[in-house]
Image (cartoon, grey):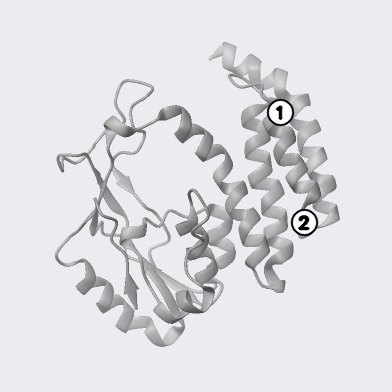
Amino acid sequence: WVAFLDADDVWLPEKLEKQQKAIKQVEEKDLVLIYCPTKVIDETGEFITERGGTKDHNPMFGIYGAGRPGFQENAFRWVIDKGFEAPTSSVVCRKDIIQQLGGFEEDMRFSEDALMWYRILENGNMFFIEEPLVQYRVHLSQWNAAATTKLKLTRRFIVYERLLQKTNRDHKSYVSFLLVNKGFRIITRSYIGYPYFNFKIIGKYWKKVLKNDNVLFAHKIFSLLISVTEIIILPVRLMRGIVK
């Protein structure tokens, strides 16, 4: 087994002990990954309890990390659909599987950890401890709100795109569907309306869908329907925004 700890994060003293206890309970049931939520802290170690008043304020606060409590079998499809939050410093997973998969994708700018958890969970089951056993540190002075928004809008697409290259044959159709229905839809819905109206970015990611040999033809057609549908409902969304 291997555990991770980012440089600025903090494990609680009992973190590994409690995770080891859970592992021993279900290890024979093909357990491959265990994780827990974290408490978000600032540079000084203070618990961040609220979002803050400015738009550039770090949006992470309170508890970061979520899941279904306890042991979960066949979690792969649920995890990639819901996009579960597994903070890197909370994860303990099977070392042999990470080695088998070749480690993290170091060329990815972000979300390489999420991709790794997805790939690991193709090989077994997971366990979620509800108790926060890690302190997750954020640096408010270094937070870039605009860059963060862009990352949030594109990261699912990028992770699904890479996962589609790596996943086994049994899951390719499902990942192909999620790439379009979730990854591409999020980008389209976000950039087609206020405040972005950026059709160039939508076109960029649509081309990625169309040129991807791993995306099923039916899903490529579906991506066109998503774009058309979002254009049709755009006036309704804008009117709702004005009313609010």
| Residue 156 x %, y % | 57, 48
- Classify 113 as above or below 186: below
Say whether marks 1 and 2 touch (CB < 8 Å).
Answer: no
Q: CA distance from mark 1 to mark 2?
A: 21 Å
Q: Which mark is residue 200?
A: 1
Q: Quadrant of residue 213?
A: bottom right
Tally of numbered discs: 2
Q: Residue at x 61, y 19 (%)?
A: 194
- Classify 5 as above or below 184: below
Q: Residue at x 53, y 34 (%)?
A: 150
Instruction: Say what secondary structure mark 2 lies in.
Output: loop
Find the residue positioned furthest to the bottom.
28
| Residue 127 x %, y % | 39, 70
| Residue 56 x %, y % | 37, 24
Quarter holding the N terminus is bottom left
Q: Circle 2: is it few (<14), some (14-19), or many (20+) Cα within 10 Å?
A: many
Q: Which mark is residue 215?
A: 2
**What amino acid type is highlighted by mark number 2?**
Val
Q: Please state if 94 lies on the left or on the right of 197 as rendered.
A: left
| Residue 145 x %, y % | 42, 29
Find the residue positioned furthest to the front.
107
Q: Which one is in front in this view, the residue at disc 1 or the one at disc 2?
A: 1
Q: Residue at x 35, y 32 (%)?
A: 143
**What amino acid type is highlighted by mark number 1?**
Lys
The mark that comes first in sequence, 1 or 2, is 1
**Does residue 185 appear in this view?**
yes
Instruction: Say what secondary structure mark 1 lies in.
Output: helix
**Camera-side residue: 116 or 123?**
116
Q: Please state if 93 lies on the left or on the right of 177 as rendered.
A: left
Q: Quadrant of residue 22?
A: bottom left
**Camera-side residue: 78 or 148?**
148
**Does residue 71 appear in this view?**
no
